[in-house]
Image: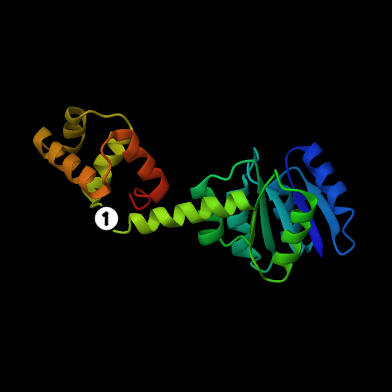
């Protein structure tokens, strides 16, 4: 199993190399600190991996953006994300939208790391327990809020509310009356079942309510 490791921390790379050195069927082709360098190499056919172990948070290009590019250009390459963060929406986007094959918490042990590599190489998905729970919780929220459909005007107002604008400022910016803004706000809270601005902001982020704005 030809494997590449991408992480901006050398100590993490060295730890992964040491753990995987015990596995006879895994060959580490190369390691990278920068996703762009890896993308350049694979595009120029300097490297042909089966599986990529990739950190989520990296300074030049993060694991989400790198995965998008890799899946678009080289869909046959399997991707496992490694992260200390198992934020539900991030896990959902990577697994359900981008199509990565694995998401692992960096808290896992060598046995699960090896199992994950084996699973994805065979065409299966592998999520660590923490990531699996995050994904399940997010899918449940989607089921709980299936009918949140905001109009274009409501999305404009939500975006301004999230940005901290008052009713008066929103009315001036959109050239509508304050009473119209207040009516829209009531409809937005009714549709989202959010009874406060912090809860509305949370739903906006979790459900991508403004993605088409």
The answer to whether residue 65 of the structure is visible from this angle is no
Residue at left 79%, top 59%?
Answer: 3
Q: Compared with residue 156, is residue 77 higher up or lower down, i.e. above or below?
A: below
Residue 76 position within the rendered picture, expressed as x and y whole percent measured from the top left: 67, 69
Q: Left or right: where does residue 197 sit relative to residue 182?
A: right
Residue 93 position within the rendered picture, expressed as x and y whole percent measured from the top left: 51, 54
Q: Which image quarter holds the N terminus? A: bottom right
Q: Left or right: where does residue 22 sit relative to residue 13?
A: right
Q: What element carries label 1?
A: loop
Depth check, front residue: 205 or 87: 87
Residue 130 position within the rendered picture, expressed as x and y whole percent measured from the top left: 60, 49
Q: Mark 1 points at which residue?
A: 149
Residue at left 52%, top 54%?
Answer: 135
User: Residue placed farthest to the bottom in the image?
Assistant: 122
Residue at left 76%, top 48%?
Answer: 109
The answer to whether residue 59 of the structure is visible from this angle is yes
Badge 1: residue crowd in 10 Å (few <14, some 14–19, many ≥20) = few
Q: Compared with residue 77, is residue 192 higher up or lower down, i.e. above or below?
A: above
Residue at left 80%, top 51%?
Answer: 110
Q: In which quarter of the image is residue 160?
A: top left
Q: Left or right: where does residue 90 sit relative to residue 176?
A: right
């Amino acid at each position: 199993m030809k494997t590449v490791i991408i992480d901006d921390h050398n100590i993490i790379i060295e730890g992964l190399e040491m753990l995987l050195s015990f596995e006879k069927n895994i060959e580490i082709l190369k390691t990278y600190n920068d996703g762009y360098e890896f993308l350049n190499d694979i595009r120029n056919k300097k490297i042909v991996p089966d599986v990529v172990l990739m950190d989520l948070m990296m300074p030049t290009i993060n694991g989400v953006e790198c995965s998008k590019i890799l899946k678009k250009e080289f869909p046959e390459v399997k991707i496992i994300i490694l992260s200390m963060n198992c934020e539900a929406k991030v896990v959902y986007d990577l697994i359900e939208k981008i199509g990565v094959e694995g998401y692992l918490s960096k808290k896992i042990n060598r046995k699960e790391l090896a199992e994950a590599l084996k699973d994805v190489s065979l065409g299966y998905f592998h999520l660590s327990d923490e990531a699996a729970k995050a994904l399940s919780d997010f899918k449940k929220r989607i089921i709980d809020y299936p009918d949140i459909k905001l109009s274009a005007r409501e999305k404009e107002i939500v975006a301004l509310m999230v940005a901290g604008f008052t009713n008066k400022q929103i009315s001036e910016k959109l050239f509508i009356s304050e009473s119209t803004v207040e009516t829209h706000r009531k409809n937005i809270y009714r549709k989202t079942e959010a009874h406060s601005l912090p809860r509305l902001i949370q739903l906006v982020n979790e459900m991508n309510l403004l993605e088409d704005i």
